[in-house]
Image (spheres, rainbow, N blue to C red):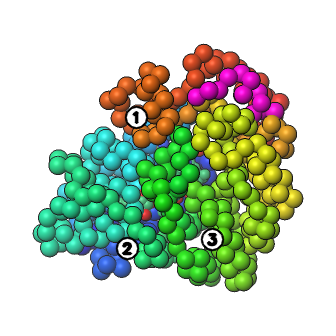
Amino acid sequence: MKALMISANTEYINMPTMPLGLACVTEAARRAGHETELVDLLPGHNTEETIRRSIHSFSPDIIGISVRNIDDQCMENPRFLLDQAKSVISSCRRFSDAPVVIGGAGYSIFPESALKYLGADMGIEGEGEACFPVLLDCLQHGRPFSGLPGLYLRDTGIQGHRAFERTLDRFHMPEMDLFSAKAYKEEGFWLPVQTRRGCPMNCSYCSTANIEGNMIRRRSPESVVEWLARCVEAGFRRFYFVDSIFNLPPSYALSLCNLICEASLDIEWRCILYPGNIDETLIKAMKKAGCSEISLGFESGCDRILKKMNKKFNRRDILRASSITADYGIRRMGFLLLGGPGENEDSVMESLYFVDSLDLESTMLTLGIRIYPYTKLAKIALMEGIIKRNDDLLLPRFYIIKGLQKWLKKTVDEWIKDHPDWIN
Ligand code: B12
């Protein structure tokens, strides 16, 4: 089968992101003997023309499209990014009769409603490496799709419950030719690398369990380092560990860092650090292995709110994480998510002053929290009448505690004026 794989994301918000997930699925399909071509629409200029040309020259039997972003999670002025994917699908329909299959993080949070909204033929919820090649085989040999794990059809819905591969080494990491590095050169980029999937932390607002499940599944650190070494050989030097939490479990993170050091890879990397239970030995090893920046996802600086968010750390832990990383010269970007359940003027001011005292290199402030299905936040929002039972939440809905919005906006605007390194 000839599978044209398209990454629909054209957003530069925060940083340009290379389509690692689509590359993983493409790698799996070609290792299963199918002919593939990957088109990354981000660096291009004329999406419709790029699609037309790719379809014309490749003549695909099937088109796989990766849907990363639904929206930008900005309450004040939300941008609904799914329409970009919708127009990519329309272009595919214009130039080809091949069936269109969608997947990706954005799709997996809303498998039914996103499929309906986007008008694709099928969707694969969760990781695509196992199901997509089997789907291609079924299409090639005219076999039925029933029972395929995580597959949704537009007309008949789910075909089989999604599966979570326990040993990620069963899925090959993508070869470098799947990343159009040259096209990204001008922007500068951090090559994404994933070592683990799944998050058991169950933060009250988070959608990761919907996307990757709540059990940590890993690649062996050896296979990750072997891949990094090949990337270095191919000329890549900067990496972004896209695991939801880099330091979980800490023993895994430590082995990974030690192996990177042993391999003498001269690389620079960033990751997302959970502020709980930080051990100096790990931070030291991270620095030695090339970590230059961490995203510290604490979200609040008030213990009462942290508890409500189901965070397993407190202000003391955040302070410790921040000061140890600073001691090792690692840049720190902090995140504050203000206006959630239980928030009041005191807790907001406590957070602002606390984060100010950390003296981070930068802080990202978000007002209001995007509500995702199956979360504790969605339950609270339903109880408080902010959302309705039949609201599928595909169109972004936000939680902001009643009565605080105006004051919060004014306070944050004033705060940011005096803090040039804070971003809203
Ligand atoms: C790391 C990360 C970032 C990093 C990215 C760094 C980098 N260099 O790539 C940073 C911090 C920069 C970032 C920024 C943003 N992010 Co972000 N990010 C993530 C995170 C944690 C991991 C993404 C990732 O790379 N996963 C690893 C790859 C391998 O997995 P994958 O892409 O999901 O692919 C698998 C499957 O989905 C599937 N699949 C993928 N494509 C396809 C295609 C087909 C055909 C099939 C069958 C299957 C399939 O198979 C793949 C392999 O198993 C996710 C949350 C999560 N746990 O997924 C959020 C997430 C994707 N981000 C999200 C958002 C919103 C954003 C921002 C808009 C936030 C902002 N306002 O700044 C920006 C947008 C950036 C951009 N330019 O597009 C949302 C998207 C949902 C939504 N509401 O839109 C997520 C889901 C988090 C959330 N809130 O729920 N992000």
Residue under the point 67% across and 75% down: 255
Magenta residues, as a range? 341-353
Task: Calculate the distance from the C-alpha at mark 2 to the C-alpha at mark 1.
Answer: 32 Å
Identity, as a three-letter code, of the amino acid under mark 1: Leu
Instruction: Name which residue type carries label 2.
Output: Ala
Q: Which residue is mark 2?
A: 28
Mark 1 lies on residue: 393
In the visual, does 105 lie left or right of 366?
A: left
Q: Residue at x 39, y 64 (%)?
A: 164
Label 1 beta carbon within 8 A of ligand 1: no
- Specify few, some or many for label 2: CA neighbours under 10 Å numbering under 14, 14-19, or 20 or more: many
Who comes first in sequence, dot 2 or dot 3? 2
> In which image quadrant can residue 223 be found?
bottom right
What residue type is disc 3 on? Tyr
Q: Callout 1: 10 Å neighbours few (<14), some, many (20+)?
A: some
On-image quarter of the N terminus? bottom left
**Location of residue 392 by image quarter:** top left
- Left or right: 301, with 33 as reference point: right
Residue closer to the observer: 219 or 232: 219
Query: Which tag, 3 or 1, sits closer to the chain's start?
Result: 3
Q: Dominant secondary structure of the magenta stretch?
A: helix
Q: Mark 2: which secondary structure? A: helix
Q: Which residue is mark 3?
A: 252
Give neighbour class at mark 3: few <14, some 14-19, many 20+ (Cα, 10 Å). some
The mark that comes first in sequence, 2 or 1, is 2
Give the Cα distance between marks 3 and 1.
Answer: 35 Å
